[in-house]
Image (cartoon, helix red, strand yellow):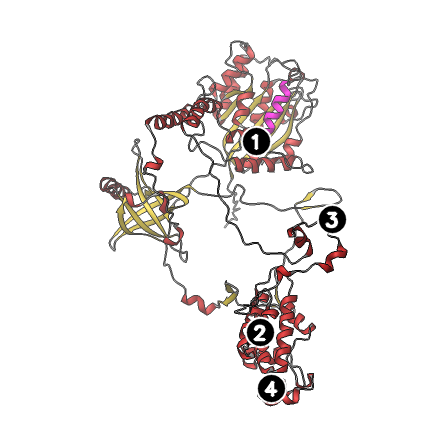
């Protein structure tokens, strides 16, 4: 048996479009067309850069190549096969995915040579055919930018042969620059270029028209991928359908490639990056915890609820991928307030399934006839959360039949707003005022925003045709940063700013009507009276001096401060309860009135806690002074009141993570009352012998006193 050699060929790479730009940089393109104007070369270079930029940002499967016509040197494959031909034609960039370096490599000025544009077409065609092996290019395009002032000098036989080859290979020739259909540009070269455009089904445009077309970046065209599912109506009816996304809110740029800038060369590196490492740290002892010992949790308020793997079995299971009809309701019940605006999808009968399409069309016609809307529950994929949608019939005049699927808001997401009644005599308008508003509506008609001589379409801001200004500015910034890495980002260009401006014709038409409205509706300015707030007298001398009536022409100096009597700040004697403004004074007044310490203790501690927890400026001196006063009173009478309260207070401070207050209490020596503090401790010990802190002469730590061992073990287990 003889040996057989098996060869496997790789499938060719599919490319949507292959474009070769022929840029004329010869002497014939270097002369400015108008006085102090741009030359043909400068316009062609700007247009070529804009085309490459748009192809880069669109991120499509496109290959781009650049050929220089009229270059100083000759560098192409046809010149190598037949020396002496195709001179002054250089392949600057071979067919490849477009990059920013292509724009940077475009020449800054024209040369003094001239090239044959017909030869450049042949070089481009040969490169499109054989330049990139193992690729299948769906659309082959050649963009020719020349003013045809350099003669081609080709014979008819050569032209016919080249034309047949172009048509056979499916090449498309586009001419950008001169108007080849203008009577002013009618010569043999223009006629030959026009023949190539027409026979290859190409296009032609001037630089002005092309640059207007390239004003805004274009999104890459992507074939919609269907979401195939069965539309279930009840237990027995299932219609195979396909859902396509019509509108979806997506980010301008989905994928960003981060690069590290080298500080020496000031260039970005694509082979280096930032290494990120995620670790779990125990905040108590600052040790690293392994991922095996970490339990995920959810933050509920200020508390973390652990959620282990065993808890996942208790989660709600939405089921498998499905689209189930829950019921039907009147179309009037589904208003725009009930829709969440999270995209729009179209639902069709399954492709190549005639029975499904027929049943689906019957469903749509029934919904239209009965003015109903379907409410469906959608589960996109196994394990995804279910969502509710409304299915609304769509029947176009062109026999376009489908269902539009829009998300429905839940009750929690809808805000009910009450508006005052306007159908009363107070808000009534006469006929003249109503007619003036009608005139204003007609004057601001966007369908007649421009004169017919200015634009082809007189409508301003047409629906589904406007580009997003924010998205365009983001893409502009990306393109500018790629070409100018060291410069600050520019302001939005005028073309983007124009999207925010009122069309001049509408502004002119509405100006007269607006002036008329101002005369018909006389507006009176309403002065809102502000409510007088209580004036809290300041406790500093400066404010006191400003509020004092002047008794003499001499100002009060700092030496006179001791003579000023602050009588206005004296608290009245009729105190009912201990407050937070002057708790010590209130405590003493109530004590003189005969209140016992047991009754005053709850009020005093409540005032101290309010001053601590509700503090804003971070000054706790008043609260600490009140604690000192309360401690001294308890030391003389009943230490148990202070110790029991302080125990609970320190626990609360620890739970709220107010360690700074605990440190202040220790610093001010406001800890528990001990027997050894004064000479009266022996006498007072008989009244509070059950207080362990008062009987012992040692100061226990906060953890040992306030938190039991069972609680500590519980937190250790968690």
Q: Are marks 1 and 3 in contact (CB under 8 Å)?
A: no
Residue 41 lies in the magenta stretch: yes
Query: Distance between the Cα atoms at labels 2 and 1?
Result: 86 Å
Query: Distance between the Cα atoms at labels 4 and 3?
Result: 64 Å
Q: Are marks 4 and 3 in contact (CB under 8 Å)?
A: no
Query: Distance between the Cα atoms at labels 2 and 3?
Result: 52 Å
Residue at image point 67% right, 38% down? 485
Secondary structure of the residue carrying numbered label 4: helix
Query: Distance between the Cα atoms at labels 4 and 1?
Result: 98 Å
Secondary structure of the residue carrying numbered label 3: loop
Q: Earlier in the sequence, mark 1 or mark 3?
A: 1
Secondary structure of the residue carrying numbered label 1: helix
Residue 512, placed above or below residue 610: above
Query: Distance between the Cα atoms at labels 1 and 3?
Result: 102 Å
| 2 vs 1, front mark | 2
**Quadrant assignment, res 125:** top right
Image coordinates of residue 586 in percent, x first then y, are 58, 70
**Res 718 seen here:** no
Estimate how packed mark 1 is, as few (under 14), some (14 to 19) or many (20 or more) residues with alpha carbons within 10 Å. few
Q: Are marks 2 and 3 in contact (CB under 8 Å)?
A: no
Residue at image point 53% right, 24% down? 210
Locate residue 326 relative to residue 340 in the image: left or right. left
Q: Looking at the rendered structure, which numbered label has been put on residue 554?
A: 3
Which residue matches tag 4?
692
Query: Distance between the Cα atoms at labels 2 and 4?
Result: 17 Å
Residue 221, placed above or below residue 432: below
Which residue matches tag 1?
130
Image coordinates of residue 689 in percent, x first then y, are 59, 89
Estimate how packed mark 4 is, as few (under 14), some (14 to 19) or many (20 or more) residues with alpha carbons within 10 Å. few
Q: Earlier in the sequence, mark 4 or mark 1?
A: 1
């Amino acid at each position: 048996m003889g040996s057989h050699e098996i060869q496997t060929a790789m499938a060719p790479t599919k490319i949507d479009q292959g474009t070769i730009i022929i840029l004329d940089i010869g002497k014939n393109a270097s002369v400015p067309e108008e006085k102090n104007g741009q030359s043909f070369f400068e316009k062609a270079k700007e247009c070529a850069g804009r085309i490459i930029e748009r192809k880069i940002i669109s991120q499509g499967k496109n290959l781009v190549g650049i050929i220089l016509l009229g270059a100083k040197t000759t560098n192409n494959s046809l010149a190598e096969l037949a020396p002496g031909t195709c001179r002054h034609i250089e392949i600057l960039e071979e067919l490849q995915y477009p990059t920013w370096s292509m724009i940077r490599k475009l020449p800054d000025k024209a040369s003094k040579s001239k090239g044959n544009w017909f030869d450049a077409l042949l070089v481009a065609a040969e490169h499109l055919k054989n330049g990139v092996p193992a690729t299948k290019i769906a659309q082959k395009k050649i963009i020719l930018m020349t003013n045809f002032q350099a003669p081609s000098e080709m014979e008819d036989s050569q032209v016919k042969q080249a034309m047949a080859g172009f048509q056979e290979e499916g090449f498309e020739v586009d001419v950008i620059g001169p108007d080849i259909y203008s009577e002013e540009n009618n010569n043999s070269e223009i006629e030959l270029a026009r023949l190539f455009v027409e026979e290859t089904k190409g296009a032609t445009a001037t630089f002005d028209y092309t640059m207007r077309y390239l004003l805004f970046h274009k999104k890459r065209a992507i074939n919609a991928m269907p979401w195939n599912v069965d539309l279930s109506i009840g237990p027995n009816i299932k219609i195979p359908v396909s859902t396509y996304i019509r509108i979806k809110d997506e980010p301008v740029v989905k994928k960003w490639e981060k690069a590290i800038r080298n500080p020496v060369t000031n260039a970005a590196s694509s082979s280096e990056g930032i290494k990120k490492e995620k670790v779990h740290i125990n905040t108590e002892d600052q040790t690293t915890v392994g991922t095996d010992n970490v339990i995920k949790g959810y933050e509920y308020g200020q508390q973390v609820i652990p959620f282990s793997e065993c808890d996942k079995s208790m989660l709600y299971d939405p089921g498998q991928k499905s689209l189930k009809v829950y019921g039907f309701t009147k179309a009037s019940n589904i208003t725009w307030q009930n829709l969440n605006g999270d995209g729009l999808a179209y639902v069709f009968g399954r492709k190549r399934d005639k029975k499904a399409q027929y049943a689906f069309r019957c469903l749509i016609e029934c919904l239209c006839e009965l003015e109903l809307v379907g409410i469906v529950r959608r589960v996109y994929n196994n394990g995804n959360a279910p969502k509710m949608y409304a299915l609304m019939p769509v029947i176009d005049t062109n026999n376009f039949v489908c269902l539009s699927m829009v998300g429905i808001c839940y009750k929690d997401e809808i805000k009910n707003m009450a508006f005052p009644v306007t159908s009363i005599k107070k808000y009534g308008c006469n006929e003249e005022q109503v007619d003036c508003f009608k005139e204003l509506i007609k004057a601001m008609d966007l369908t007649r925003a421009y004169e017919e001589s200015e634009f082809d379409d007189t409508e301003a801001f047409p629906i589904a045709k406007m580009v997003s200004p924010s998205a365009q500015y983001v893409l502009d910034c990306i393109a500018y940063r790629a070409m100018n890495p060291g410069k600050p980002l520019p302001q939005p260009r005028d073309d983007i700013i124009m999207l925010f401006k009122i069309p001049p014709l509408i502004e002119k038409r509405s100006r007269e009507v607006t002036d008329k409205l101002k005369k018909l509706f006389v507006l009176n300015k309403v002065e809102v009276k502000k409510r007088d707030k209580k004036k809290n007298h300041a406790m500093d001398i400066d404010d006191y001096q400003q509020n004092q009536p002047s008794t003499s022409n001499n100002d009060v100096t700092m030496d006179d401060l001791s003579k000023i009597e602050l009588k206005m700040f004296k608290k009245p004697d009729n105190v009912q309860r201990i407050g937070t403004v002057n708790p010590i004074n209130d405590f003493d007044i109530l004590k003189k009135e005969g209140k016992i310490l047991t009754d005053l203790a709850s009020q005093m501690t409540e005032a101290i806690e309010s001053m601590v927890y509700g503090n804003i400026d971070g000054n706790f001196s008043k609260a600490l002074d009140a604690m000192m006063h309360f401690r001294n009173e308890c030391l003389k009478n009943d230490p148990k009141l202070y110790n029991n309260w302080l125990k609970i207070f320190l626990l609360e401070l620890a739970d709220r993570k107010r360690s700074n207050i605990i440190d202040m209490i220790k610093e001010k020596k406001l800890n528990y009352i001990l027997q050894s503090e004064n000479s009266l401790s022996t006498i007072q010990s008989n009244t509070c012998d059950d207080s362990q802190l008062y009987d012992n002469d040692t100061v226990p730590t906060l953890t040992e006193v306030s938190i039991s061992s069972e609680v500590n073990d519980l937190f250790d287990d968690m």
